[in-house]
Amino acid sequence: MDQKVRYELEFPVNSSPQLLYQYISTPSGLQEWFADNVNSRGEFFTFIWDDVEENARLASKKTGEKVKFKWVDDNKKDTDYYFELRILEDEITKDVSLMVVDYAFEDEIDESKLLWENQISDLKHVIGSI
């Protein structure tokens, strides 16, 4: 079986890091732009798109800075893959960016990046960063 490849994307976002963090770290925030429905029970999150359900564990978070979700299998055991959303703020200009770290199969990277671009576009609309 092919291994997925790690990739990173960076998106400038016209928002305060505090506001942005609410949208990347809470089920209600993620539901506004990332998935149709997001539920959490403790550290486990369920992301629902149409009829597809994916489960992840909140592997780490640093308030105001980043969240990392590790995908889990049906037995709630960690897989090798995760996605991370990291807020970057330029010390001098105070410009804010959202760094996305994700994995995709080699032949699906372009499609996966496009999906992130669309989702981040939705996020920008939700927080008024257009």
Image (cartoon, rainbow, N blue to C red):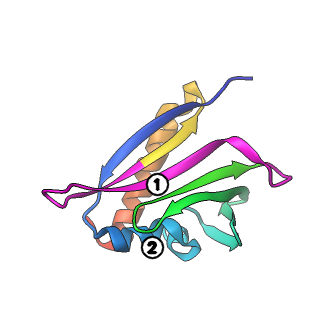
Query: How far across and how far down the image is residue 94, in percent?
Result: 18, 61
The residue that mark 1 highlights is: 85
Q: Amino acid at mark 1?
A: Leu
Does the stretch in magenta take in 87? yes
Going from N to C along the chain, the mark reached first, 1 or 2, is 2
Looking at the rendering, the stretch of residues picked out in magenta corresponds to 73-99
**Quarter assignment of residue 87:** bottom left
> Do the CB atoms of the residues marked 1 and 2 lie less than 8 Å apart?
no
Position of 34 relative to 72 (above/below): below
Q: Is residue 107 left or right of residue 8?
A: right
Q: Is residue 79 left or right of residue 29?
A: right
Q: Amino acid at mark 2?
A: Gln
Query: How far across and how far down the image is residue 22, in percent?
Result: 45, 73
CA gap, disc 1 and disc 2: 12 Å
- The dot on residue 22 is 2
**Quarter assignment of residue 15:** bottom left
